[in-house]
Amino acid sequence: MYGVSASTSRAAPAFARTPVRRPTRASLLNLSRGSRETPRASASTADTRLTSWLKENDVEGKAIEIAYVGGAKDDAETARGVVARANIKANDELVRLPRRSALVVTEGMANPHPEFISDALWDAVGEEKWAFRVALVLLREYALGSESAFAPYIAQLPEVFNLIGSYSDSEVRAMQYTLAAKLQGDQLGENAEAIRLVRRHAATTSALATMSDERIVWALDCVRSRVFSGRLVDDAKLKAKLLPRSLAVGTAFATFLTAPSAEGRWLAVFAVLALTVFDSAQNNERDSALAYVLMPLIDMVNHKTMLKTEFEFSGGAFVLRAPQDFAAGSEVFISYGVLNNDELVTRYGFVDAENVADIYRFEGLLPYLQANHDAMKRALGADSSRLANLKRTHPVLDEALWNGNFISDGNAEDKLLWALRAVLATPEEFAAANGVEGFKLGGGGPGKSPGRANC
């Protein structure tokens, strides 16, 4: 069964090329940082207690074991993951987690713990801030201490989360990435709103009222980085598979970046958190409940950028299956979804150096090129109305020029390439292409490649 690996071969070849780890932001930014929390019991002690708890609660994970697969143990559990005990084939069962052994919050759920969470607070948080509702349930278990049915699980949760809301301003500046400051500010705003709601609505006699601001943010970060969501059908005959919905996530993340109001950012960021869904074409939404779940053991499996990871919910248990083959002794990965590094660092506190889904945003690319790029100066000097016409006829291309999105291989995204081809063309090339539309696949004459701008 699962257990705690005693292996110290963290530098073994099996782990040498693992592309994703949860690095501290100090390693990410080459900056030093000390822990702001008092260390808890040693990780090995907490993991041993967790192993016993998993067994007692019928959590099955015969194919895997908890291990420290790279780097030193720390409060952020940076190096923890799971490894294969024997050879694993794609679609083999990795974990079977009974629903009673998970922390589950469903849509429309009445306040489950009125002695800890006031009805006023539960209602003020509302359905749209569902991640904070899960955080409140988690805080209740934390407050119970050893009396909580989830005490060993709570004890081994990371004490520090390297999400972007915990970055200092100097660390954000060191990233040299304009978008990072917006992500940091929005997450700090969400933290402040959560604290405000607790201070305003928590019953003065409840343990929640005495929780520190830091502990409230800790619970919210736990949920941000570990939650799964989807529709549950309490019928053993129906199976609902969890599949990453990368398009929905990408749309929600774009909304998160552009939402004009704090409420809009709450809605968008928690849509991003609904990363993985357990849904099925067989299931009528009227017969199912949208649920948000913290899954012990499953949430220890690290991320690798892949197309999908499948779960099932059947017979009262969540089942995690292997997305691919894994050799005995190698680290086991699942996919949290096809996410770019902005989403990964915001939600999980790490980036994937080999992320084929990554996008780099050079905000303000257009004015930068206008000021510094000779070819742009020449093209616009020869046709001063081209940018204004582009904004009027193809606003999405004007937006692409301002956002400056580049994909993981270093090339510009398609809309940006299209826009650059159009604005950098000479008057003769522009006429030969019959205007902007002619540059969608290259245009501008036979010598133009459809994949590159003339820059």
Image (tube, grey):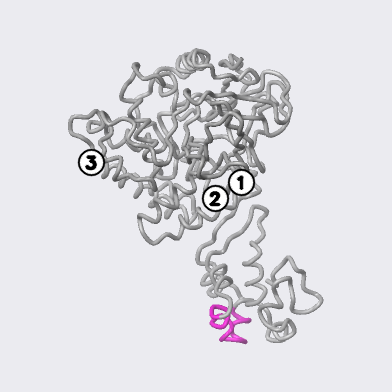
Q: CA distance from mark 1 to mark 3?
A: 38 Å
Q: Position of residue 295 (x, y in %)?
A: 50, 29
Amino acid at circle 2: Val
Q: Secondary structure at mark 1?
A: loop
Q: Secondary structure at mark 2?
A: helix
Residue 451: x percent and y percent?
A: 73, 65
**Which residue is tagged 2?**
249
Residue under circle 3? Answer: 201
Q: Amino acid at mark 3?
A: His
Asked if marks 1 and 2 touch (Cβ < 8 Å), the reply is: yes
- Give the alpha-carbon distance from disc 1 to disc 2, as whole Å: 9 Å
Residue found at the very far right of the displayed protein = 446
Q: Quadrant of residue 372?
A: bottom right
Q: Which residues are magenta?
A: 377-392
Q: Residue at x 57, y 86 (%)?
A: 384
Q: Nearer the viewer, residue 413 or 205?
A: 205
Which of the two marks, 1 or 3, is nearer to us in this view? 3
Is the C terminus in the top left, top right, bottom left or bottom right quadrant?
A: bottom right
